[in-house]
Amino acid sequence: MLGLVLFPLVDDGSGLIRSPANALHHITFAVCAQFALASKPLLHSLLQHVPSASFTFFSGSWSRGISYDTYAALRAEFPKEKCFFDVKIADMQRPVDNILKMLAEEEHQKHSQSQTMAQKKQDQKEQSARPLPRTVSAIPT
């Protein structure tokens, strides 16, 4: 891999012949997401020494993935503009539960609103169906 980054030499238009990584002034490092939090000091040091670098956190194709908490910790630990994520979240049940709970609450609100509207319509029908009370004139003649 290092050989591909350092060779072949290219002319970037500056009059100097450079390696592709040097000519592009950016390199992204692939980091296994499962072990990234254990390597925080080294990864922060790498970002400090190579300011134009970024990380691509990955979980392997056949991996079980990472937990949502690990994903959230990685997003909080490293600068967002320096991180890319190619990961599978293993415990997707938590976000799915949150979404299902939100949908259930919305459905409950719609149902209660429709019941309220139906009750109002029923009350209006009952009031309009009632005969008006007769008034008796008490004027002496």
Image (cartoon, helix red, strand yellow):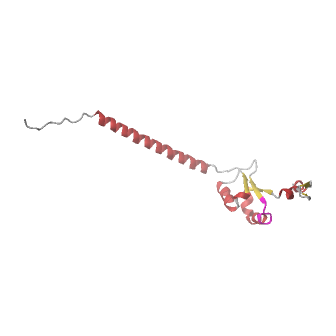
Answer above or below: position of 131 versus 54: above
Residue at horizontal 33 percent and vertical 35 percent from the top: 125
Q: Which residues are magenta?
A: 47-53
Question: x, y (%) of residue 50?
Answer: 80, 63
- Position of 96 compared to 25: left or right? left
Is 7 or 36 nearer to us in this picture? 7
**Image quadrant containing the N terminus:** bottom right
Q: Is residue 92 magenta?
A: no
Q: Is residue 50 magenta?
A: yes
Question: x, y (%) of residue 67?
Answer: 66, 54
Question: x, y (%) of residue 20?
Answer: 87, 55
Answer above or below: position of 28 versus 109: below
Is 64 or 53 nearer to us in this picture? 53
- Position of 80 compared to 2: left or right? left
> Dividing the picture into quarters, in which one does residue 39 lie?
bottom right
**Image quadrant containing the C terminus:** top left
Answer above or below: position of 141 versus 47: above
Question: x, y (%) of residue 116?
Answer: 40, 42
- Position of 115 compared to 24: left or right? left
- Position of 102 compared to 125: left or right? right
Residue at horizontal 53 percent and vertical 45 percent from the top: 103
Taking the view exactly as shown, the residue that stands out farthest to the left is: 141
Q: So how many labels did they put on this image? A: 0
Is 89 or 131 nearer to us in this picture? 131
Is 40 or 66 nearer to us in this picture? 40
